[in-house]
Image (cartoon, rainbow, N blue to C red):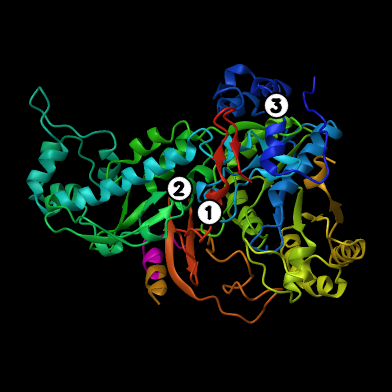
Amino acid sequence: MNSSRKLQVVSPVPADIDIANSVEPLHIAEIAKDLNLSPLHYDLYGKYKAKVLLSAFDELKDREDGYYVVVGGITPTPLGEGKSTTTVGLCQALGAYLDKKVVTCLRQPSQGPTFGIKGGAAGGGYSQVIPMDEFNLHLTGDIHAITASNNLLAAAIDTRIFHEASQSDKALFNRLCPVNKEGKRSFSDIMFRRLNKLGISKTIPEELTPEEVKKFARLDIDPDSITWRRVMDVNDRFLRKITVGQGPEEKGMTRETGFDISVASEIMAVLALTTSLGDMRERLGKMVIGNSKAGEPITADDLGVGGALTVLMKDAIHPTLMQTLEGTPVLVHAGPFANIAHGNSSIVADKIALKLVGPGGFVVTEAGFGSDIGTEKFMNIKCRYSGLTPQCAIVVATVRALKMHGGGPDVVAGRPLDRAYVSENVSLVEAGCVNLAKHIANTKAYGVNVVIAVNMFSTDSEAELNAVRKFSMDAGAFDAVICSHHAHGGKGAAEKQIEMYTQQGFSNLPICMSKTQYSFSHDASKKGAPTGFVLPIRDVRGSIGAGFIYPLVGTMSTMPGLPTRPCFYEIDIDTVTGKVRGLF
């Protein structure tokens, strides 16, 4: 029996949180039952969330996959164009109205934008994931696990430098391999990874020569080469650059470093691209944190921490099952920063979902920001590692964004829209369609059908919407659909780094451009489809464990800052009912 439900919509559309609070979610066991998901293959996290275990995929591995659909967008305004809303609305239409097996696969939102400038990412209006407050906040703790893992590795780096600076080779070795109760020394399992890397085949510590002892025990990390930074899941501009080691116990061993936001951590990218617990263990161990003074890459396993990182991440590897307002299933997993990492939800969530829906069913997954960032990284990075191929790519467009690309005034979050965006101007829309055409061409280059979803707002005129639809078809789209799901639901140093990564054997990894989402170029003010520009590369960093190199383009920041009036001004709780207010 299908437990999906039809919504009673209200006009004008109430606030997102009010809509979310007006619907009592189904018990998550009902959602799991609709998917024929055995209770053996999920763990409950309260009444409305469950972790789907990787064993679900093993159980269904011989079943034929369903259809695979990716949702991207045109170059957005700072307000966003409703890509998550479109993704959720499409799935509600497929599941609640067309009675198809469908699973929505979404990233977990960061608390940075939730409390900062953009708000949550549960969709909007009558196309949302619920409970939306749980979706946008702690969920099942995956981002907290990433934060803890990342910072454990950061602590291990500085601690190792500290101890190597104050001990002889022999003393260091003796502490790394202490004498046990029987008076013998032994290597821990993880130490054999470093021994193998060094070409040392000996298994008994006492058999190592003084030269081998030094090679094994002394990582000799070059502090200036360290790329691993601490993280937290809050926008905090004052942590972008800090100095550690100022306590008297650190004996003057200060080092300048900084914080990134948690979703920019390589561990988040690893989670999104991993295919199994064993694969995640290998990827976490291979993460490169910097170089030795001799130029050799130093990994998490060299520091002896790869296994511990995996233990902290052992529950986070399982996707979280939730539901839409209309009772269709959602898998929420991973949330890599779209303009720093690859901006897509996890491979394991997609693979499990494709088996659960089976032949004739649909898995719809969202790719972050415009298709020049999210969809291209989905195709070039995620699909490369997953081996999956989508049958269709959706590009979300709005009249508002097209007017901006056609030369309209700046769109600024928190300010009322200029009159140009709320009154009919077909010529402005047509001028901005050059941006849409480029996204269609880029996406079609991957050999998939492209469908344009025009997210309609109440201020859009029929003539403007028809102009977008006609242009889309002329530009080679398979179809262009006007969508009202929000209101109706289912209805220089860079060159040195490149040379270093090449010497270390990482030159064959895919490139993941870290750039602004507001333009094809590095300059957010260049709208439409600019050409003839040169991308200025400020730095190049390696996510070796995740499996890509990411150049930082222009002024791209890995730790956002809060605006003057952050979203948290609106967020509070009803102390009588316990309901959250103000999330959107």
> Does residue 51 appear left or right of residue 71 in this picture?
left
Query: Is 501 one of the magenta-colored residues?
Result: yes
Looking at the image, can residue 533 be seen? Answer: yes
Three-letter code, disc 2: Asp
User: What residue is drawn where x is 51% and y is 37%?
Assistant: 138
Pointer 1 residue:
116
What's drawn in magenta, residue-wise?
A: 499-507
> Does residue 274 appear left or right of residue 56 in this picture?
left
Q: Secondary structure at mark 2?
A: loop
Pointer 2 residue:
233
Three-letter code, disc 1: Gly
Q: Position of residue 552 (x, y in %)?
A: 48, 66
Q: Position of residue 555 (x, y in %)?
A: 48, 70
Pointer 3 residue:
24
Crowd around label 2: few <14 · some 14–19 · many ≥20 (10 Å): some
Residue 525 position (above or below residue 243): below
How far is mark 3 from mark 2, CA to CA?
29 Å
Q: Position of residue 442 (x, y in %)?
A: 71, 64
Crowd around label 3: few <14 · some 14–19 · many ≥20 (10 Å): few
Q: Earlier in the sequence, mark 3 or mark 1?
A: 3
Viewer-closest of 171 and 215: 171
Q: Earlier in the sequence, mark 2 or mark 1?
A: 1
Three-letter code, disc 3: Glu
> Does residue 179 appear left or right of residue 261 in this picture?
left
